[in-house]
Amino acid sequence: MRCLSLARCFCLAFLFLPTGLSADQVKLETALANPTMKAGEEGKQLNYLKIGLRGFELAKQESKKRAPVNVAIVIDKSGSMSGDKIKGAKHAALEAIRRLDENDIVSIVAYDSDVSVLLPATKASDQAAIRKAIEQIEAGGSTALFAGVSKGAAEVRKFKGDQRVNRVILLSDGLANVGPSTPDSLAELGSSLLEEGITVSTLGLGLGYNEDLMTRLAAASSGNHVFIEDIESIAAVFQNEFDDVLSVVAKDFRIKVRLQDGIRPVRLLSSTGDIEGQSVELRLGQLYSRQQRFYLLEVEVPSKEHGTEMPLGTVEVIYNNLITETRDELSSKVAVRFDKSTEKVTSLENIDVLTQCAIMTCNDRNRLATELRDKGDVGEAKKLLIDNAMQLKELRGRIQGREGYGAVAPQLEYGIENNEKQSQDVSGSDWNRSRKSMREVQNMTEQQQSYGGRGKVEIFKDKK
Amino acid sequence: MRRLTIALMILIFTGPLLVVGLGWLWMTRQQQAARDSLTAVFASQLREHNRPVETLLQDYEVRMSQALDAKFGSSAQNANDLQTSVDPVIGSFFQINAQGRVVTPTSGEAWLAALLIEQPWLVAPQQESNSVIASNDVQQFANAASQQAQVAVPFRSLPFRTPRSQWTSLFVGPGVQLFYWRQLSDGEIQGVQLRRGRWMSDVIAVLPDSSPVPTDTSKNVISFSRQIRVIDAASEEVYRWGDDNADDWVQLAETFMPPPLSSWRLLMLAPKHATSPLTNGSSRWAILIASASLALALAGLGVYVYRETTRQTRLANQRVSFVGQVSHEFRTPLTNIRLYAELMERAVLDEDTSRKANVIRSEAERLGRLITNVLELSRSGGQRRIQPTTEVPDQVIEHVLESFSPAFAAQQLVVEHQADADRPALLDRDLLEQVLVNLFSNVEKYALSGKYLRVESRQAGDTLTVRVHDHGPGISGKLRTRIFEPFVRGSDAIDAPAGMGIGLAIARSLARAHGGDLRLEAVGQGTCFILQVDAPVSLDEVGIKDHAGDNQ
């Protein structure tokens, strides 16, 4: 299977793409925060392994522009959605679907206390049927969110393909109050859908939805989560979501890190994966055009003699390339050097990885701040967020002007700005609103999402 | 009149009430039957909805078995684990070796703990083994469970030679968790824990949704809105579909979901207002209308009967009062006739004239008695007031007998009076006389042929008993029971003696008014009446004297 697809890939490249294989190939970058570690230290030292993936750019002039999509739009039509919300949502969905063509599949599901599959999975070219389905949505009733997502996923499943972008877009403004409603059960559903290659993006509308449930569902299935505070921006959010959907270049990533004996995996920074023994397994739903996606693994490394190089481990990636329509594999070896000079160790540190480690560590602590605030401990939460901003600023001061700083500066600034703002918000009067915003940013950071409720945030994208 | 009204009311109301009651009973029976049959229909429809879930669970079984092969099978070891995909419904695998040692997972999970508590024999070693070493928290737990298992269910120590597999469902944490596991012939147990969030989603996905479907009228026999709900083990609603247009729902049917999900149920509901066709409003109206019209008819009939009866009663009363007044008017001339007949008798003209005057007097006396009876009858209904005076009963009897003696003597009737009531007692003399006159008049009219009359009187305590026994033709058996009813006579033949048939009725009612009774006694020959009245023996000697003096 592996040989076959590689061969096919090669053939394709040879016959049709003389410019080279690498243009339509996801890049795997592995790097350490400290590629050189202090030699001869007592005990073990911590280091951070970055597993970075870069999505290639969709070549616009080619006849085959993008991968076909298979999308289910699941709209909450509970009573709270009535009025402008449902109107805005219908309009936004209709406008967004216009961008699809006859290769794409779309289905429309609306739910309140029960679920109606208004448009079973259909070719997106059947605009009349889509319009009819969307227009019949009327608000009223409770919120059977779990069932809505289940039915949406079932519609997507009908035409699910390895070479298709399979996505459920859930728009809700309310708490799930019929059927399973715990964040855990939704997260469980999300991760099982990811296993099948289905991603769920959750768009939270207004101030009434359960942000924990919505972010966890999105995160578990590698989807986007957006907090739409302003009804006016529903249309823009739908467009941004479709920008993402239509720019998927690769999907169904399975990443395996195998560490050498003696190297202990400690934890993943601000993301989830299975750590078992010496190996760590990660799953990623998809990679968008020009997206930088990275995971950071904290490892414990025993110190060695000065001048030695020690293999740390290997990273293997397997994914479906939607442009070449192959199942591709990538792999990389990671090694670490040891030097007795502290100056040399410091001067060789990877600014890029260091910054991202700081951002992700702060993201974990940001979550902790939300929990503290939930318990009513406003002071501690505030302190933690201020401390986050301080640490990021301190890092900024330390690395400013060094080579490669320019590339990570936007990410760093974004982190500082958010933590500072949130440190104000936790003691503010509108905690409900602030909490939703906080959850959104946490998820955006973890997922390295390209946009949020207030527009595009392209800090995790390669420049054109 | 009041009794009549009450009787009529009962008649009018019992009918319709009976109709309503029976109708109601019939209707509820019908409804129950209809409901039962509908429930059966609905239950079978519900079971139809269980089919896709059944298929899903069967599919799971196949998939889980494949997943277990892939995970634990011999070919599984060499495969590139990035290439093999895991079934999305699988949460975790677990593996317990023949020694009862948990191999997978290596960390303690709540679901595993629950599973081992529920089925401790899973970790009971199949072979005796001392090599079980507690290496982690799961194992400690498993050891504790296995010890318990050896005491309670030494199930696993039985030799198993054939692999078996089964589902287990347990209530853990948020709800029911599903486990599928199998036991190999060497005793090893391999299983999976299914992702609850996922299988719930799959169950929902295979069930229908509420999207409006084009209605097929030919297929839909019962077409009213319905809703079906999926209820979990904790009685929480998981999912619903169907109509959603009511606030009040009535349960039509219920069924359990197929195992291993049998702790979940499907409910079929209908809006409360929509189930009224089921209870058949029209038959309820029919019963109400039927009973109302019956009530109306009976009421009309009742009013007619009431008016007719009151009219007749009024007429009868008028007649009686007319007779009473006329009779009263007869008295004065009759008294004069008697008086002048007596004067004529005393004047002693000649034998023949004297005899004729005697006849006039006795006939006038007879007419007088008749009038007294008629008057007595006309005022019946109103109770006669008793005016007791102190009298010697035998004297009263003698007095009455004396007045009859000319008539009796003329027919050679032998009169025997066995007098044994000579103590003065309190009684209404006029009343007693009238009763006796009526009895003796009957003898005079009907029993002269017997030629014999025996009158016995006696006092026992406060009761005076007079027995009047003649040797006449007697009263036939048929008549004996009715003889005391007014206007009943022994014979209505033309040659029968004159009379109105009221004598005995009056006599009895007078006797009863006096605290006693008048009965007919069965005797061998003739007729025998027993008169009993309440006559307390008086000790007032002065009274006796006074009255005695008056009477004589």
Image (cartoon, coloured by chain):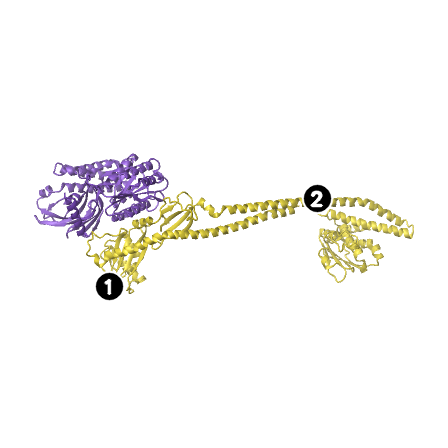
Chain colours: A purple, B yellow
- Rendered image quadrant of residue B444: bottom right
Q: Dot 1 lies on which element?
A: loop
Query: What is the crowding at mark 1: few (fewer than 14 residues within 10 Å), some, or many (at least 20)?
Result: few
**Label of residue B314 in the image:** 2
Which of the chains bears the disc numbered 2? B
Specify the farthest residue to the right. Answer: B350
Nearest the viewer among B462 and B83 is B83
Residue B213, position in %: x, y?
37, 45
Which of the chains bears the disc numbered 1? B
Mark 1 — residue? B129
Q: Is residue B155 above or below residue B14?
A: below
Q: Is residue B419 above or below residue A143?
A: below
Q: Mark 1 or mark 2, which is nearer the start of the sequence? A: 1
Going by the image, does A56 lie left or right of B440? left
Instruction: Tell us which disc is closer to us: 2 or 1.
Output: 2
Specify the farthest residue to the front. Answer: A15
Q: Amino acid at mark 2?
A: Arg
Q: Dot 2 lies on which element?
A: helix
Q: Amino acid at mark 1?
A: Ser
Going by the image, does A101 lie left or right of B374? left
